[in-house]
Amino acid sequence: MHQLTLAEIARGLADKKFSSEELTKTLLARIAQLDPQLNSFISLTEDLALQQAKAADARRANGESGALLGAPIAHKDLFCTQGIRTSCGSKMLDNFKAPYDATVVAKLAAAGAVTLGKTNMDEFAMGSANESSYYGAVKNPWNLEHVPGGSSGGSAAAVAARLLPAATGTDTGGSIRQPAALTNLTGLKPTYGRVSRWGMIAYASSLDQGGPLARTAEDCAILLQGMAGFDPQDSTSIDEPVPDYSASLNGSLQGLRIGVPKEYFSAGLDPRIAELIHNSVKELEKLGAVVKEISLPNMQHAIPAYYVIAPAEASSNLSRFDGVRFGYRCEDPKNLEDLYKRSRGEGFGAEVQRRIMVGAYALSAGYYDAYYLKAQKIRRLIKNDFMAAFNEVDIILGPTTPNPAWKLGAKNSDPVAAYLEDVYTITANLAGLPGLSMPAGFVDGLPVGVQLLAPYFQEGRLLNVAHQYQLNTDWHTRTPTGF
């Protein structure tokens, strides 16, 4: 049963081939057996899962149906879940049990999804390798000596290892798409505002967006259907109708205009990945797509702009973790200043502290105009580049990452080298666009992803292209040895 996709599970449950309770018990046993190798979960929620599975079976027995009714999933551990630890991968929130459900958690629970647990992640979603977690690094199931990507690496590793069919993630600068690429999954970052951020613990509020991680575009369509929609509790949520994503999967690609930016194929891209991307382009041309070269001239400024804006917002968002109201508090503080300093110094890890300091510096009185304001102007230029490109093409295609997964610890001494792994993904966050990564082949036995970007609220178009590609290739069906 562990090899079934979400779509296959939905059909199996509808045909009474197995019950949600049977499936849930099978996957919980598999997690107990295999996850010690991966460290992909922070918390397991066996009692809740079995309770939800029994309720889903009862709903089906009463005549209800639905693609997510009885389907097992997991949540990245920054989605608040009532009465369950929500840690953000940090010592700061190790003892925090959320008093309410995030909107995404509530919507999926209402649809009948079964929550198996909370997945490991880079601390406060800051990282590209899932090595900054307080609970230890996550391992890539394709090679346990390599990283799975971050910050949604726990969700990605768990799905790739067939511990469950799908999971939620969040994407601030590529944190769904990059681990999807490095673990042979399909991962989708929706348009900013498409999925509610209420109850999703913030890293950078103008960049964060929740989305699905699964093995196929079809499964991502099913999970996104349950996550998307307007939420009056989230001031950044957009009141836009949610289409039936599954209904658009089988559209023809005849005449689809695909743009390939020339800036993507620079010296920083592994030439073997470049070859796989070109092969993907040829596959889509066979399906009727028309390909042309385009330009995104301001892409070179994306990383410096992102690493001013994101840390600036992080320094503001994380100021609430002060040892006073909730979260970690140091032992025996001498006074209020000591309480603040030691609680934050002991509760936050090195990468989070680094980004808070960078952000506080960029927002300080003497440097706000020179750094933060200038970065926001560059952000606008990047958005304008995309708007101009989408006047010429329907989809933009390129690599998701410049390299395959690197070895654990290989970039720990050079944070900037890790930041450069986000070069192709962060532009979508700066512009608020939807983006998808799908499997495109292997380099040295490690998976490689191809990234698709589309205009605002065109998630259906991305899923359609990815699904048609997956009907004609088998990269997404490959399973890591031992799992």
Image (spheres, grey):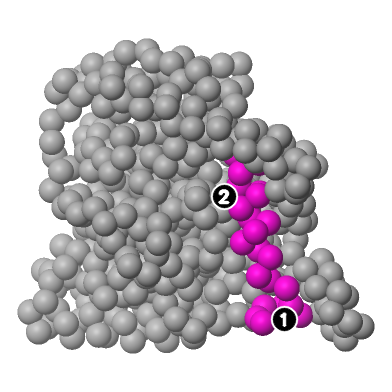
Q: Nearer the viewer, residue 13 or 63?
A: 63
**Residue highlighted by disc 1:** 324
Q: Is residue 78 above or below residue 195?
A: below
Q: Earlier in the sequence, mark 2 or mark 1?
A: 2
The local crowd at label 1, few if under 14, some if 14 to 19, many if 20 or more residues have their Cα within 10 Å, is few
Across and down, in percent, residue 459 comes to 28, 43
User: Where on the picture, by quarter, is residue 17?
Assistant: bottom left
User: Which image quadrant: the N terminus?
Assistant: bottom left
Disc 2 from disc 1: Cα separation: 30 Å
Q: Which of the two marks, 2 or 1, is nearer to us in this view?
A: 1
**Residue highlighted by disc 2:** 150
Residue occupying image coordinates x 28% and y 18%: 392
Residue 354: tell me if it is visible. Answer: no
Residue range of the region highlighted in magenta in the rendering? 306-329
Callout 1: SS: loop
Residue occupying image coordinates x 55% and y 79%: 85
The local crowd at label 2, few if under 14, some if 14 to 19, many if 20 or more residues have their Cα within 10 Å, is many
Q: Is residue 389 above or below residue 44?
A: above
Looking at the rendered structure, which numbered label has been put on residue 45? none
Q: Is residue 294 above or below residue 163?
A: above
Residue occupying image coordinates x 29% and y 80%: 53
Q: Is residue 55 left or right of residue 349?
A: left
* Residue 244 inside the magenta-drawn segment: no
Number of marks in the rendered image: 2
Across and down, in percent, residue 54 comes to 27, 85
Residue occupying image coordinates x 23% and y 63%: 9
Q: Is residue 236 above or below residue 70?
A: above
